[in-house]
Amino acid sequence: MPKTRAKRSPVQPTPQANRLTALAGQPWLPEPAIWLALILSVFVVYAQVGHFDFINYDDDLYVYNNVHVQAGLTAASVKWALTAVVSSNWMPVTLISHILDGQFFHMQSGMHHLVNVAFHMLAAVLLFVALRRATRARAASAFAAFVFALHPLHVESVAWVAERKDVLSACFFFLALYAYVRYTEKPGLGRYLAVLLPFCLGLMSKPMVVTFPFVLLLFDKWPLRRVRWPKILWEKTPMFALSAGACVVTYWVQRSTGAVQAIPFATQAENAMVSYLTYIRQMFWPTRLAMPYPYAQSVAAWQAALAAIVVLGVSALAIYLWRTRPDAAPYLTTGWFWYLGMLVPVIGLVQVGTQSHADRYTYLPTIGLSVIVAWGAADVVAKWPRVKPVVVGLAVVSCGACMALASAQAASWQNIETLYQHAIDVTDNNWVAQYNLGQYLMDKPGRGADAIPHFEAALRIKPNDVKTNNNLGACLLDHGRAAEAIPRFEAVLRAEPDIAEAHFNLALALSQTLGRASDAVPQFETALRLKPDYATAHHHLAILLLRLGRNEEAIAHLEATVRLSPDYLSEYNLGAALSTMQGRKSDAIAHLEAAQRIRPEPNVAEAIERLRTERQDRR
């Protein structure tokens, strides 16, 4: 009897795969249309930034006060980019992108902003393409990409020129993710190297992408379903080595430049737990967003406890589902640990800077939350097809709301004043915003008086800050309030007694206060002891000594002023002082003539003629 071969039943896809395929297979929106929609929606939100200014928070370091960026693309500027540390970061690819901006757009701030927007558009499209290739779920991938493109939490990364590192590193991150999906389809050395190259470029754009190999392990679990230990771990060894090297370099650079803050670890841990929950709240209710958020030196115990319970509870649930019901909601595990893991470098366990948290830190991590929502919605539609119009409607409404909120949030980045005033309006005790707005107004012609209340507010929050005390004193002095300026400069000198400029400022305030002129002399002298070539201090001390009748001492300081910084005023004052001294008429004439050569003035010419006449009469 001939043997009959049993027929193999076709491999049945998992219920999860059926549901996702059903949703993904909708022909209603071709992929190029999704790309175009992503680009246009980003343009609608961010076209306004083409008219925005630079801000005085890192933009000066990266762009408008950076001589290498101003010089454009040269061998020297590229060498600088490869070796420089800017704002406590080593990011050569980002710096080269700024140099290219300087080459083509010079210091046109709007163009620098629009380059950020272009990278954000590209990042959104690459995210969609990577998710679509990995999951075959078109609609869910599109929703996650639109949330990434339009969420107001991401405005800070796009509308801030100095955050070029965010949008640039994201492009390389998504490109490496797409390359990894291709590699898993047909492993080979060439495809593996195609993953490593954009990953390396991402690390050199912003080291936050050190979590990339961890994200790949999550992707191996879902959606790629290739969990084969230890193979998947060994193949990522070179990537983990690159990440470890980037972590060491970044920590060393930030530590050596003083960027790492000395904050008790317990406070850091509490703030980290609360920040995890804060970012989730902002993801789903994005209001009162600001740059920067002030760091609270203490966190309420109940807040830290609640945050820890939520984070650990959701993590336990994700692990439980992964181990016991791997097909129930695999995207929950990938999405949740994407969110938690990608935030680790910036969650504050090693505190860099003075912010408690920052919108820019969510640029890549919150994609994990979007994945949970998008594929969770896919499951709902697959289970209850009748609710599909409701789910689609909610998706459209949420994207529309994100567009509106992001557009309004972007408007606050128009200039320094609008940015920090917005931060002051929506946060409490924001020292950095108050100080930076005060500094901006102080340097703006005719706005110095407006800076005073902001410096005063900053001092109420941080009373002993040296820079704030000094700037407030300078503003008060400039506006005729010398007596009020004195305590500010004294506070500076209590903290740092060897600042020549602070002694000079205190001397100026004392010299302009009734009955305190003689007290100003030792302050001027201390400033000159600390900084002997301080021409301005020599000049002001000389003027004060003339007022006090100490003419010979005054002349010595005027002569030092002329020697260090000859200009019309120093030459004229020295000439005028010498004209009152017996036997110094010729010297007086010489200095007045020097002043006249610098800036001809009728009264100086008359004084010269009068001195010449007096000299001839005596002969």
Image: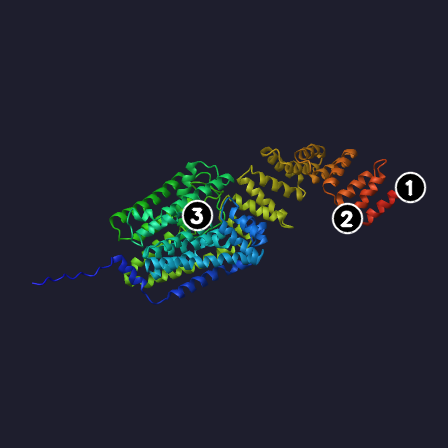
Q: Residue at 89% of width from left, 40% of height from top?
A: 615
Q: Where does the image place residue 360, in percent across and percent down from the top left? A: 46, 50
In depth, the one of 390 and 350 nearer the eye is 350
At label 1, which amino acid type do we have?
Gln
- Quick one: SS at disc 3? helix
Q: According to the image, label 2 marks what residue?
A: 598
Among the two numbered marks 3 and 1 on one chain, the one whose residue lies closer to the N terminus:
3
Q: According to the image, label 3 marks what residue?
A: 208
Near mark 2 (Cα within 10 A), the count class, few <14, some 14-19 or many ≥20, is some
Does residue 163 appear in the picture of this structure? Answer: no
Does residue 61 appear in the picture of this structure? Answer: yes
Marks 2/3: CA–CA distance: 56 Å
Answer with left or right where residue 581 lies relative to residue 419. right
Near mark 3 (Cα within 10 A), the count class, few <14, some 14-19 or many ≥20, is many
Q: Where does the image place residue 24, in percent across and percent down from the top left? A: 32, 62
Query: Which quadrant does the C terminus fall into?
Result: top right
At label 3, which amino acid type do we have?
Met
Q: Where does the image place residue 606, in percent across and percent down from the top left? A: 85, 47
Q: According to the image, label 1 marks what residue?
A: 616
Among the two numbered marks 1 and 2 on one chain, the one whose residue lies closer to the N terminus:
2
